[in-house]
Image (tube, helix red, strand yellow):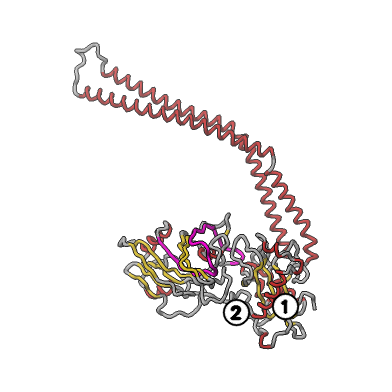
Amino acid sequence: MPSAVTYFDPQPAAAEIPTVFASPFEHAAPHPLARRAADELAVMLRAGAFGIDPVALDAAGGGKMFGVLVVADRNGRIGYLRAFSGMLAGAWELAGFASPLFDAVARDAMWPAGQAELRAHELALRALDGSPVQAAARAALAAHDTRAADDLAGLDARHRINRARRRRERERLEAERTADARDADAGSVRASHPTETRPDDQTATVAARLHALDQESRADAAERRRFDAANAELRGPLAETVAAFERERTRLERLRADESRELMKQVHDTYVIANARGEQRPLRDLFAPGEPPAGAGDCAGPKLLGEAYRCALTPLALAEIWWGAPPATGGRHAGTFYPSCRGKCGPILPHMLDGLLVASPPVFGGGPFAPTEPQVVFEDAWLVVVDKPVGLLSVPGRSGALRDSVQTRLRARYPEASGPLVVHRLDLDTSGLLLAAKDEVTHAALQAQFARREVDKRYIALLDGVIAADRGVVDLPIRVDLDDRPRQIHDAIHGKAAITEWLVIERRAQTTRVALIPKTGRTHQLRVHAAHPLGIGAPIAGDRLYGRVHDQPRLMLHAERLAFVHPHTGERIELVRPAPF
């Protein structure tokens, strides 16, 4: 037997051995034997076993996902394998852990050359960015634009003064011409006053002055055209030099991206994925017609199953646990078990488990609910507010497999209603007040209030931990985790703005009851903001995606208060539904 296998001592009784392999995508607590194996691994990690520095794991960005796989050998002895996701301490392989799934010889044959090419492009980009010629060109262009902007501002200011003066002069001349025309129409006799200017002479004088003003306008316009032409002539060569650098940068970036994609294809071609039946498939086939994401096949779960099949071991139970500092994106806590990710492992693990007796993956949102759900809290001719129970979707699932939802039930309850009905959404695991409109006009008006952030919402949550501060504001942009939907992660660069105010209501021995007031409406915003170390720093109790425990009957999050202006009556509607926990 390989040294990577650690056998339980004492051996578990027959009744303690799992007969069905739990779905790796299940959020429930792992099998007791898998937890026992993980606990033993945690002790070793704390002690610095395997040459792993525990201080490095606890340093910022040093945390890692580890996995254990309970196995049975040919003699029926029960033990477990260990693995880590990706690389650890800069190495793919470490004594005492499962080997990666790729063909090391094939990878070593192509990886150095591919990396060298990418490194060359990276160095070329750095050289381009650091080029003194480029810096000088950009500085010259910037200096020219600054001078031109100042000169243009002065020219425009002078022309504005000229226009204002000409406008006043035209108004005065037009007034004189109007007065002269009025005098002529009245039959004024000027012959008896030979010293006065005749009306036709005055008209000619006014016309001449107006013509002169028009000429001044043309002169200003011509001056602006000359300025623009001179500026373009001077700026053109400078701008072309900078544009040439930009074109070269774009070319290098495109070349680097193309070669990176080609290198990843070659890398993925070194992975051959086996299953319990002994069947093998290339990694890229499992993701066809698309391409595998970066890191596919390198998670702890696939590594463990691959190691078990290579060593003729029967997999019994899997557990993956995060150890060390949380990632910058949040959503991971030391010592917490997590299901396998769906983005990278979703297509791989079902194939690898084929041939074993495996429990079906969990389906959320399909539980039975009484016909009276959701219960109505407020209703009139235009809208209805309901209390959504935990586990009921706000709208049907995208795949169409899960049709039961608040929207579906309201559609059946109000067959005469038109439009989308549900105005906003609550997470599947969240309970509380949900607003729906019975017609399209009302729906649009209410959604406009949400868009303008004129709707007041207040949630009650029970946090897993004691919070020292009394109140605060969390401002952390978030986005979907592309490798593990529907989880959301903090991303300061690509995330969407998300702001939450919070207030402590009550502190208990190990939990804190808080009020959460979202100022934006991002998916899982409250859950991420509660759990993230840069947020409140304590996950919502019972949170299967971002929490630390699995012993709560539900996600302890409830939409308690909803206040808005009725789009037809103008009345301020405020509704409260106390949290059931």
Left or right of 186, for residue 348: right
Instruction: Report if residue 477 is visible in the image.
Output: yes
Residue at horizontal 19%, vertical 23%?
186
Residue 444 vertical placement versus 429 (above, below)? above
**Does the stretch in magenta take in 454?**
no
Q: Which residue is mark 1?
A: 80
Q: Identify which residue, 570 or 504, lies in the foreground.
A: 504
In percent of width and height, residue 517 lies at: 45, 62
Q: Amino acid at mark 1?
A: Tyr
Helix, strand or loop under label 1: strand
Quadrant of the rendered image containing residue 352: bottom right
In percent of width and height, residue 452 lies at: 42, 56
In percent of width and height, residue 164 lies at: 38, 29
Residue at horizontal 59%, vertical 31%?
234
Quadrant of the rendered image containing residue 419: bottom left
**Magenta stretch, residue numbers:** 455-484
Residue 223 vertical placement versus 47 (above, below)? above
Instruction: Categorize mark 1 by other alpha carbons within 10 Å: few (<14), some (14-19), many (20+).
Output: many
Task: Name the mark on residue 537.
Answer: none
Q: Which residue is mark 2?
A: 360
Q: Identify which residue, 41 or 573, lies in the foreground.
A: 41
Quadrant of the rendered image containing residue 94: bottom right
Q: Identify which residue, 389 or 279, lies in the foreground.
A: 389
Left or right of 199, for residue 443: right
Left or right of 497, for residue 174: left
